[in-house]
Image (tube, rainbow, N blue to C red):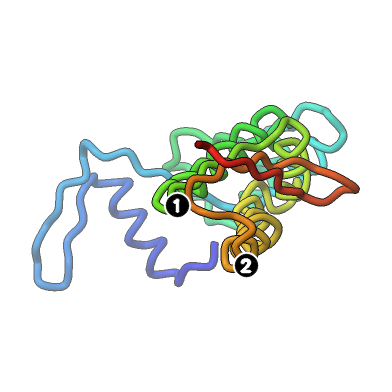
Amino acid sequence: EKAHPDVFNVLLQLLDDGRLTDGQGRTVDFSNTIVVLTSNYAADKILDADRERREIDMEEVRSFLFTKFRPEFLNRLNDIIIYHSFTQEQVEKIAALEFKQLCVLLKDQDITAELTDDALNKLAHDGYTIELGARPIQRTIERDIINKLSVDIITGNVSPGDAIMIDVKDDAYVFNVKDKS
């Protein structure tokens, strides 16, 4: 939606002909290509429906999209797929996956870390908003776990060979350290 109008003209050619020709006359075949386009234009309508826990009116979404995109462009799309907000369970799975990346880094220093269920729940809660999705989980891990853990490593409170259980106390992450040996 933010692209220059020429981009839409190129997309029309690609969607119509299944090929593109560049400025030097070279043609690239796109006939066996799946093109996925994303847009946030109807996001407000979708978020409202998700908040109200009601079905999305696809005709309303289509009508709205026709006010933003040219009909000849929209008519070349096979389908419009709506992505809904994550459930709490899905956010917790994402948080666990993001935390595993930290664990890989800690492994290089011979340190292991685990989250209690309460800590995982807090990470999922603090790192997710319906408007921004799950992207803030990484920032939450950096701000609330990595930064504090880095200080503990530098000051010697956490050392190679330690196992850390990350829990929650008074709505803050706490590190319970035990020597693995």
Q: Which residue is labeled 2 in the image? A: 155
Disc 2 crowd rating (10 Å Cα; few below 14, some 14-19, many 20+) is: few
Q: Looking at the image, which residue is at 82% across and 51% down?
A: 172
Disc 1 crowd rating (10 Å Cα; few below 14, some 14-19, many 20+) is: few
Query: Between residues 167 and 144, which one lies in front from this camera angle?
Result: 167
Q: Looking at the image, which residue is at 44% across and 47% down?
A: 110
- Disc 2 marks a residue whose amino acid type is Thr
- Disc 1 marks a residue whose amino acid type is Leu
Q: Does any portion of residue 3 appear in the rendered image? A: yes
Q: Does any portion of residue 74 appear in the rendered image? A: no
Q: Which residue is labeled 1 in the image? A: 105
- The residue sitting at the front extreme is 181
Percent x, y for residue 170? 90, 48
Q: Name the secondary structure under disc 2.
A: loop
Q: Name the secondary structure under disc 1.
A: helix
Q: Earlier in the sequence, mark 1 or mark 2?
A: 1
